[in-house]
Image (cartoon, coloured by chain):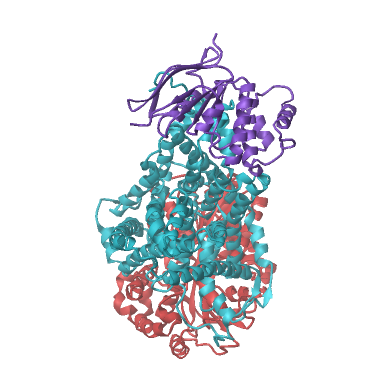
Chain colours: A cyan, B red, C purple
Amino acid sequence: MRPNGCGGTEYGDTFTAGADCMLRVAPYLVAAILTGPVLAGSLGALIPSFGFLPSLGHDEFGLDAWRALLDWPGIGGSVLLSFASGILTAGVSLLLALLFLAVFFETRAFVWLRQAIAPMLAVPHAAAAFALAFLIAPSGFLARLLSPWATGWQRPPDLLIVQDEWGLSLMAGLVMKEVPFLLLMALASLAQIHAGERMRLARSIGYGRISAWFKSVVPALYPLLRLPVYAVIAYSSANIDVALILGPVSPPPLAVQVLRWSNDPDLDFRMIASAGAILQFAVTAGAIALWILAERCVGLLTRGWLVSGRRRTGDTGLAALGQGLFPTLILASILGIAALGLNAFARVWRFPDALPGRWTLAHWQSVAETAGGPVVATLWIALLTTLLSLVLVVCVLENERQRDVRSGRILEFLIYVPLLVPQIGFIFGLVLLAELAETPPGGGLVAAGHIIFVLPYVYLSLSEAYRRQDPAWTKIARTLGQSAAGAFWKVRLPMLLTPLLTAFAVGAAISIGQYLVTRLLGAGRVETVTTEAIALAAGGDRRLIGAWALTQAILPVAGFALALAAPRLIWRNRRGMLGGVR
Amino acid sequence: MLYRRGFAALTLVFGLLGGLSPVGAADAVKEWKQVLDTARGQTVYWNAWGGDSRINAYIDWAGEQVEERFGISLVHVKLTDTAEAVARVLAEKSAGRTEGGAVDLIWINGENFAAMKRNGLLFGPWLGRLPNHALTDPVNNPDLGLDFGVPVDGLEMPWARARLVFYRDTAILPEPPATSDALLAWAQENRGRFTYPLPPSFLGTTFLKQILIERVADKSSLYKPVSESDFAAVSQPLWDYLDLLHPALWRQARSFPKNAGGMRRLMSDGEIDIAFAFSQSEASAGIDSGELPETVRNYVFDEGTIGNVSFVAIPFNAAHSDAAMVLANFLLSPEAQMRKQDPAHWGSATVLSLGQLKKEEADAIRGLDLGPAALPADKLGAMLAEPHPSWTEALEAEWVRRYGVR
Amino acid sequence: MTLGLGLKDVRITLGGRDLLSLDCVIEPGTVLTVMGPSGSGKSTLLSFVAGFLTAPFTAEGRILLNGADITDALPEARHVGLLFQDPMLFPHLSVGGNLLFGMPPGSPDRLASAGEALDRFGLEGFADRDPATLSGGQASRVALLRLLLSEPKAALLDEPFSKLDRHLRGDIRRFSFERLRDAGLPTVLVTHDPEDAEAAGGPVVELAGTG
């Protein structure tokens, strides 16, 4: 409807018809990318779980696979482990992230915290897990630093620390990666809820820093963190990379057990694997459901506390805890990466020497000889998928702005679908579908698979900044004679350069870290630094693993460094461009 | 001359196995020529375990050679587990793709071969078409015709021989326990200093079989399908043994290394004192790279250790089966086999019969330095054959039932 | 042809409720001041004139600029300049870049005329400056200059002085109205500061609050 006299809505009619059409289609395209493969892949797991796998001569539906699954020794342990690591990792990560924000919000260290997040996020899960494993093992870096002078150990003690049966080392590894993720998500929301004003108000009427945070900011912040937290639960309850390195071996977390079944030489195990994948859906969904229940309970239980008027609730202790834990987390990350680096240059490194006894470049030579192809493949897939994702996300956000509608709660939720549905469940089904469609395995298919996971992260890291940009900038540009397109290209996008680059770095890091998708959709033909690193991890030579894990980590970290450095260089004479979104 | 002798033997073998109708030598040469022609310009996707950088380098070398000589490019698809390739072929079959498959050649043996054969996922028989096949002297080496007791039937090509060998640091443990009883006694005295890889990893299951073979009274039942014997009764000595051993293992058997590499790493970190591998060269390579102390040496059990042969197979729907055959034939050449056995490159024992080679080739292979940790051939002891593959599955399942739950 | 900005039977409604009705002509070089509490629709009037009116507001009536009906024209084709509370200098461009951004393309020696204009405004040598380094008063002047150099035929001011320091406000206000008058622009000023209206010296329309 265009009421008389209301000439020219904000933009629509001056983008070319083609561009306008693209904007209109984008939300639907994004929704399709986010849900189509997940749904289809899940179906591909569901059908064999009921005994239907004609290629193996099983063409009658039945419950045998489910019976075998439920009879499997240790299945209860696997389920419990996955369930618990989902809930506990999310709980601990959320509490730590909120505590760190409470302690450091708008202090001088806050800038530091902001900057520490990017590199911590950029290090791929597998590399981080290797680093942690070597750091805390009885023969690991910490033990070597402390032995024998402090511990008296000449030989490593026989202690089960890494891959412990309670999954504690697994959860510790996950928490190290999920805290930065939640911090990033929280930081993006702080401005929206006017966290600064809330804090200042609460502090001014006598609330302690921690109490002020948890009573005045968290109740508004948590609703915005809800979906990210569910994503953490989903990832922690169903991941493969970290679980393979830090998870208990017997019984293993459910996702690892599913992978073992699907790799069993007895092909009939494929159907049990399918049933296991469906069970994994249920476990993840159950963990999220329990969390939602817990949300309600916490809400009820804290209702009185929120308005009790108590100005301090353990503020001193909690502040000390946060001030102690955050540097510990950073230090552990740095030590872990340093230990990987030492391994990568070590020729001989015996326990309990604190440093390698002899050094070598041989591992790097080996990397240099073989890394060329994988690095190129990694880069083109990451750049292509991230660029496509970025274009799609910008289209969605621009469409939202032009039509002056939030693209809808539905899309906001759909963004989380690939993050909430366990990968192991639908990727196998996806491979089957790709085969049915006669799509040859290779780079194209892998890139298509990566977009499913890159898109949500690009959206999550860009949307806030994009929506916050003041519409008045466009109005000014239009009254100065620019068309809608001109205002978009000359004002909107350049002003969003920093968030665009950050979103790009986030997307590229996600693509670089993908293992299962690359592996399965590429039929192993597409070698990236991640598949290469994990293939060699099977060989167990930690020095070579160190060199590869660093190679794997360098690419995304370099991406983040570029994303941080480029605006500083480009805008070195534009102070207004370095202070966040206008 | 070499070829002619080879083909005579070959026709004999296939006469025996009934795999192929005998063909004349001239036909064979012509037919091979045709394979070479078709193969030129093709790309072989070879799915092989990628966990060892030296093996990867060897495969790269083979790729350069076949590129140069036969115009074939080789892509090494690096697996973490052979079953991944089997899964891929299976997915293709599920989708009805009977040609143009993504996998051209798989490094395989035992269980995976048995599974693929049972499900009709293999191409062939093709072994008899390879000129170099004769060099393995199949008539006098019947073990090459069986893969874990399952007849090969020309569906895969023997590539490497493997032997289970133990190793330890002689500076710490000069006289290692060389029977299962001695190992148990030693482990109980030295708690936490021994472990084995988690079954069903290849090496972990092999350890179970090694102990089983040594402790079972009637070994013959192990070489027949498990369904033909009373599994519980036959395997009981193994479980009795493990029940005693486990409390004395590294981490009280609450955790296990994942595979040979994981176990070598524990050895390197000084966490355990005895490890084992499926190759004489593993310890030597570890010494060369500085991962293991220089005083590490291999040893075997008094009553012998398990040995087997690993193979390469072509899936039924391979897109480039001709190039795969040419590559396989090259892998079986004296030159490639010698480089493979050389510990400087890999150190995996040849499947060729030295008597079938030219004298200088045979001498060169005999003269290879096997590395610092290796035992000379005459000290390697008896080779115990792999039990029937059905035992593997049964042992793994029972192990999980007993020890996979807490 | 009537020179100036004509608002003919303009009526702005929100959900069927009348916000404001206007019927007047603003002569070149004069300022129409629209006053009223927030929510009275005064900023919406500017949006309508500039071409940015969006739902849920609706508007009737015609906008005539120097005799031409621009009611249905695109914002960039209206030649109507806009000033906000904030100077809104593009932070990614230099001061000179901000000026050039608004100047019509193709005019000869744009760079030189931008420099001369800066000199006239007491901002010599500011062309390469980063807008973020300007004082509030300087930024306001650059914003006004940017508007003038874009050669508009009318100007719309949305409380442009309300964020300035008290001691600056009078100077800038006087300076701005003088320049707008010199340029002969019909101007609509939206404000709730009576001093603004007084300084503007033109007709004043008082809007009622939302009932």
- Quick check: B342 left or right of A415? right
Image x and y of residue B263, in percent? 51, 75
Residue C6 vertical position relative to residue A519 in the rendered view, above or below? above
The reply to whether residue A56 is visible in this rendering is yes
The residue furthest top is C1
Residue C23, image quadrant: top left
Q: Which of the 4 image quadrants contains residue A345?
A: bottom right
Q: Position of residue B304 (x, y in %)?
A: 49, 81
Tell me if I can see residue B123 in this picture.
no
> Looking at this view, is A167 or A349 the one in front?
A167
Instruction: Report whether A507 appears left or right of A573.
Output: left
The residue lying toward the viewer, choosing from A557 and A373, is A557
Front position in the image: B128 or A189:
A189
Residue at 53% from the left image edge and 44% from the top image edge: A385
**Can you tell which quarter of the image residue C96 is in?**
top right
The x and y percentages for residue B290 are 64, 75
Where residue B54 appears, as percent x and y from the top left, is: 61, 65
What quarter of the picture does the C terminus of chain A occupy?
top right
Residue pictured at 61% horizontal, 19% vertical: C184
